Image (cartoon, rainbow, N blue to C red):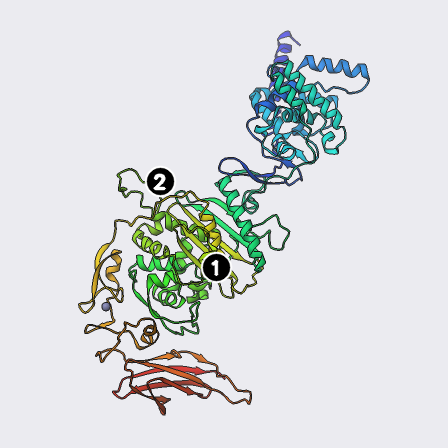
């Protein structure tokens, strides 16, 4: 073998070694490590955390290490850390000598870099392993900056019990972030990984204290801390039992990705304040049998959730408390009505004050009732929305179309309407479908955001204070309709359900309530230009509570939360869109030459809406059924007075298509039902015919008790002038 060949072999071997050294270190040292779920506020403060999958409190790694801990750690573990190449031969030699002298291992001589390698590999502590660790440590030094290596160590070092990593340790032992530790606390945590079992077991506390104090002394001598700081630090006691972590938004924490650190949009101070309100209100509601309460606050300008209470008093031991009610599908009651009003207005199906029928009706077996069980004959659409009347809403939905409304709600972000439109039918507007508080609040927020009118110059000429408003595609051409919707909802002096004495400070808001069938769900959603607040109250298990309503139960919580938000005088601005039109002052519809009229700005699609059908030769005449219910509430209404060409008599009960179940007396005899007709003329005589057979006549009050045989029937009424009306109905077996 020649000299050259030997040299070539040597070079080859050295090259292989170099390559081996270069590739020996895995790309991600802690690839298989699992971490805690850590959820932070928008400001980066800890909202809550969940233990890692392996039962350890191990926060996801940080990139940086707080100065005090870094200083204390390097001073205690590895004083040459900032200078050495991953191994420290001097320290190792010293350790070897010490170990040989004493006959057993008293010192590791490991650098912090080597300890990072050991933490990532979790092998036994043998001489061979230490050699491997040394080689890998030098490789790690080539790859990473010193600060990164230190951060890796801080994130994975054991701190006793199931506490791993500095961040988890700072919270568990001192109840605050690592960046806020005192020198004494930083020193305690710097010495702890060296013997992590001491603190956990509660034994060796004296030894731990001495170690800490020795380190503090070293820091003093090294000039890291002054004499005063040193003296004060010595006085600080060691921590006791581990502390619970913050639990500021427990249900929201559950919603975040597991095993990751997530910076949310929740604002910590607002979150605390909203939680305090819901906790207090929840205690009150519990006395009435209402166990669960949820609230969501959204910043309209960004669409971000800024406060989230999935279920109030989450720390109480009670059934249902774990349920995140804000994200659970619940019957929507009346809470979706504003979306129908806005859409019908935007598309020119109605105008803001269009009269909607409020009379008994039977639509394919669906006979809606108002909350108060009264009918009002005819009600302007905006008032029907403010008073949350059910019957006009059903008439409006029938006109708008269930499939279209169903699709609209899905576009607005409701993921819970998973059935076909047919499945819900017209009941969709009265709580026949389910919705989640978080999604419904977001849908309202989207609507409110589109009404901010950011481009409209303000009176004083400055830029809008409302900042960024981003009207979604849903409302791009419907701002005026949105504005009218908000205007209808800002009416707070409403006759329905609310006891205003319960509400401390009434702030200006556009708001809507909802109560589901059987008093199971109480909803209230309120909007200001800046924020949208959604509140739900009820029982997670679904049982109803008599007296529970959106206004009375959820309303006060809504206004308490509203009171927490920054107070501003801003209100939604009327957008500069729409057209001027002549509107009938009585029907709210496009005026005919017969109508008393006034100018109004309406969405331009409204020009396609129906003209007023109620003014006949100058007289305002409703249909007989509408009139029947309208008159008692409107003394000024004069009615037909021989107006020609109008319908003069109409059935009030039942409506055509109804299936009747005739009650029986105790004797078994069928009781019959009272049929009712309305006639425009007070003194008309009406002749009744059941299936072409005359059955009686009525005057003044047109009511007749009949007990037809089971099966299908036609009932016709005729007056003395030949006007008639018919219904078809079925009597059940
Ligand atoms: Zn009119």
Instruction: Say whether marks 1 and 2 touch (CB < 8 Å).
Output: no
| Any part of residue 415 in sight | no
Q: Is 588 displayed left or right of 516 in the figure? A: left
Residue 403: give x, y in percent of width and height: 39, 62
Q: Nearer the viewer, residue 444 or 26?
A: 444
Which residue is situated farthest in the top direction here?
3
486 vs 619: above or below = above
Locate residue 684: give its quadrant. bottom left
> Who's the residue at 32% across and 49% down the image?
476
> Who's the residue at 48% across and 59% down the image?
552
Distance, label 1 to label 2, CA atoms, is 34 Å
| Quarter placement of the N terminus | top right
Residue 514: give x, y in percent of width and height: 45, 60
Check residue 467 in the rendering and tell me which mark sits there, or answer none: 2
Dot 1 corresponds to which residue?
Answer: 552
Residue 690: give x, y in percent of width and height: 38, 88
Q: Is 299 displayed left or right of 126 in the figure? A: left
Classify mark 2: residues with Cα within 10 Å, few (<14), some (14-19) or many (20+): some
């Amino acid at each position: 073998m020649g000299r050259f060949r030997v040299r070539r072999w040597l070079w080859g071997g050295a090259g292989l070694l170099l390559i081996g050294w270069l590739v020996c270190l895995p790309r991600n040292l802690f690839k298989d490590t699992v971490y805690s779920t850590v959820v932070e506020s928008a400001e980066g403060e800890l909202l809550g955390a969940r233990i890692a999958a392996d039962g350890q409190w191990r926060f996801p790694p940080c990139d940086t290490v707080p100065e005090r801990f870094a200083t204390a750690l390097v001073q205690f573990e590895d004083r040459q850390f900032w200078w050495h190449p991953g191994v420290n031969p001097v320290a190792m030699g010293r350790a070897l000598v010490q170990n040989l002298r004493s006959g057993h291992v008293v010192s590791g001589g490991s650098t912090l870099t080597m300890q990072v390698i050991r933490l990532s590999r979790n092998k036994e502590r043998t001489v061979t392993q230490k050699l491997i660790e040394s080689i890998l440590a030098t490789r790690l030094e080539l790859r990473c900056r010193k600060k990164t290596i230190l951060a890796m160590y801080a994130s994975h070092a054991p701190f006793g019990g199931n506490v791993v990593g500095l961040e988890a340790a700072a919270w568990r032992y001192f109840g605050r972030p690592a960046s806020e530790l005192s020198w004494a606390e930083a020193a305690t945590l710097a010495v702890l990984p060296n013997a992590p079992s001491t603190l956990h077991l509660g034994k060796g506390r004296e030894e731990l204290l001495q170690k800490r104090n020795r380190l503090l002394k070293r820091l003093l001598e090294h000039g890291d801390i002054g004499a005063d700081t040193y003296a004060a630090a010595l006085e600080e006691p060691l921590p006791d039992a581990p502390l619970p972590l913050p639990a500021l938004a427990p249900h929201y924490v559950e919603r975040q990705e597991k095993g990751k650190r997530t910076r949310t949009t929740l604002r910590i101070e607002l979150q605390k304040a909203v939680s305090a309100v819901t906790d207090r209100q929840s205690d009150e509601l519990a006395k009435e049998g209402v166990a669960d309460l949820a609230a969501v606050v959204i910043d309209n300008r960004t669409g971000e959730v800024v406060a989230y209470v999935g279920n109030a008093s989450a720390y109480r031991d009670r059934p249902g408390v774990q349920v995140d009610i804000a994200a659970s599908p619940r019957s929507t009651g009346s809470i979706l009505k504003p979306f129908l009003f806005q859409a019908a207005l935007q598309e020119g199906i109605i105008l803001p004050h269009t009269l909607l029928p409020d009379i008994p009706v039977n639509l394919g077996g669906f006979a809606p009732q108002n909350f108060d069980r009264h009918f009002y004959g005819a009600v302007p659409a905006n008032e029907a929305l403010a008073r949350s009347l059910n019957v006009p809403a059903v008439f409006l939905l029938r006109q708008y179309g269930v499939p279209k409304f169903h699709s609209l709600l899905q576009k607005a972000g409701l993921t819970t309407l998973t059935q076909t439109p047919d499945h819900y039918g017209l009941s969709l507007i009265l709580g026949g479908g389910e919705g989640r508080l978080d999604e419904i609040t977001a849908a309202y927020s989207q609507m409110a955001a589109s009404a901010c009118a950011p481009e409209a110059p303000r009176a004083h000429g400055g830029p809008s204070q409302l900042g960024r408003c981003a009207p979604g595609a849903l409302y791009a051409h419907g701002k005026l309709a949105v504005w009218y919707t908000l205007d209808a909802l800002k009416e707070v002096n409403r006759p329905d359900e609310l006891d205003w004495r319960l509400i401390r400070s009434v702030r200006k808001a556009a708001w809507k309530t909802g109560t589901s069938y059987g008093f199971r769900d109480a909803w209230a959603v309120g909007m200001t230009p800046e924020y949208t607040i959604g509140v739900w109250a009820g029982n997670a298990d679904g049982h109803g509570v008599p007296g529970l309503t959106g206004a009375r139960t959820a309303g006060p919580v809504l206004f308490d939360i509203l009171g927490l938000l920054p107070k501003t005088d801003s209100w939604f601005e009327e957008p500069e869109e729409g057209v001027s039109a002549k509107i009938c002052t009585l029907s709210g519809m496009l005026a005919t030459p017969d109508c008393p009229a006034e100018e109004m700005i309406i969405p331009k699609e409204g020009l396609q809406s129906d003209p007023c059908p109620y003014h006949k030769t100058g007289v305002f005449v409703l249909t007989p059924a509408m009139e029947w219910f309208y008159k008692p509430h409107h003394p000024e209404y004069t009615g037909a007075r021989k107006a020609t060409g109008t319908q003069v008599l109409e059935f009030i009960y039942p409506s055509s298509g109804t299936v009747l179940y005739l009650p029986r007396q105790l004797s078994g005899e069928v009781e019959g039902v009272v049929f009712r007709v309305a006639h425009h003329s007070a003194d008309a005589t009406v002749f009744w015919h059941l299936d072409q057979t005359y059955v009686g006549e009525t005057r003044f009050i047109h009511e007749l008790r009949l007990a037809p045989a089971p099966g299908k029937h036609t009932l016709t009424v005729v007056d003395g002038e030949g006007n008639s009306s018919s219904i078809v109905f079925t009597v059940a077996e």
